[in-house]
Image (cartoon, rainbow, N blue to C red):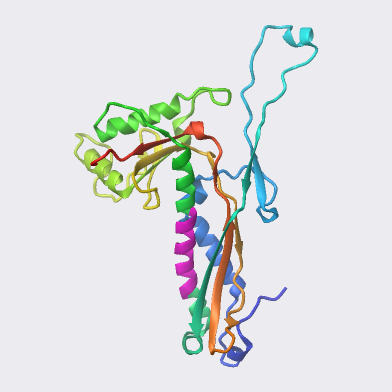
Amino acid sequence: MARTKALSLLQAASTKADLKEIYGIVIENIQRDTLSNALKSQNYSGSPAAGSVEYKRFANSQSKTYGTARTAGKGDAVKVPPITVNVDTHKEIVEEVSKFDLDTFGVAGIMSRRASNHIDTMASDLDTAFFSAACTAAAEITTNATDPLEILEAAILSLETVKNDYVRGTNRRNHRLILSPSYYSTVRTKLDSQINCNVDTAAEEFGMYHGVKVYSSINLPTGIDFLLMHTDTVGQPVIVNQYSEPEKIQLSNDYAVSLFYDYGTKALTSDLLFKRSTPAGG
């Protein structure tokens, strides 16, 4: 199928924009720029377009004395409770573009300029919703430590030693640590002061701490120093509707440029989420 072209009134001036390609750029960049996309669980069944998807979590198997199943006449049922995430948040970005701007910059120019900003807006929405859900479900870290590095280690140990019907401890390679910019700066400054520290103090970022991947995000909820999570602990199915041709606004000489997207966000495994709230007066 041929690409959708720009407004026919502009085609005479050779201003053609493959809007689907711009849409592809938007999707690619949103996936690259959103931290939540890298952290969310992708293990769901169903289609977000249907309005909801389902995640499943398998319980650990249990060993029993030999002959137990034969005596009972059956084995243990596999525990796999479903978790439904509804695509219930509907957002739009609708902007008016003047005919003068379309003539001056062309459809491709306008769409490229606005697509860049739309990426930032959508990425912020998704990350904010993701971290809000995660932090709401997360357990508060309890420690008497005051040193930021000791606090981080206490959090990591809390996640590493989780034991229940579904978890027998976790590997640090699957931990993700997201810090607020302020706390990130505090930790980074502390690392810079360490003797023989193996962190490059000239670099902007330190990507790992004691085997755990580290990120900084401005989209953590206010009052949260950091969030520590295991991979696949939060679900966020997303639907993005592709760009269409700029639509003429009735009774005007302007056009509307719009992007519509839908998503749902839910913490799937609250036992694998830990947070550190900013102390009062901190």
**Relative image position of residue 44 (x, y in whole percent):** 64, 43
Foreground of the two, 166 or 210 = 166
Q: Is residue 94 above or below residue 51?
A: below
Q: What is the quadrant of the N terminus in the image?
A: bottom right
In the picture, the quarter occupied by the C terminus is top left
Residue at x 55% of width, y 72% of height: 258
Q: Magenta residues, as a range?
A: 113-126
Q: Is residue 61 above or below residue 196?
A: above
Task: Give the camera-side residue of 214 and 259.
Answer: 259
Q: Quadrant of residue 172?
A: top left
Q: Main secondary structure of the magenta part?
A: helix
Q: Is residue 68 above or below residue 172?
A: above
Relative placement, left or right, of 115 versus 82 is: left
| Residue 100 position in % (x across, y down) | 48, 90
Quadrant assignment, res 70: top right
Is 264 drawn above or below residue 142 in the view shown? below
Residue 143: image location, x then y, percent:
32, 27
The image shows residue 98 at horizontal and vertical percentages of 49, 86
Farthest bottom residue in view: 12
Outermost residue toward the right?
73
Q: Residue at 51%, 34% (x, y): give it.
A: 270
Residue 116 is covered by the magenta coloring: yes
Q: In the picture provided, is 176 more to the left or to the right than 243?
A: left
Residue depicted at x 34% and y 47%: 180
Taking depth in this image into account, of 58 and 197 the one nearest to the observer is 58
Q: Which residue is found at the position 49% from the left and 33% from the top?
A: 272
The number of discs equals 0
Would residue 184 appear left or right of 112 to someone viewing this image? left
Q: Is 17 one of the magenta-colored residues?
A: no
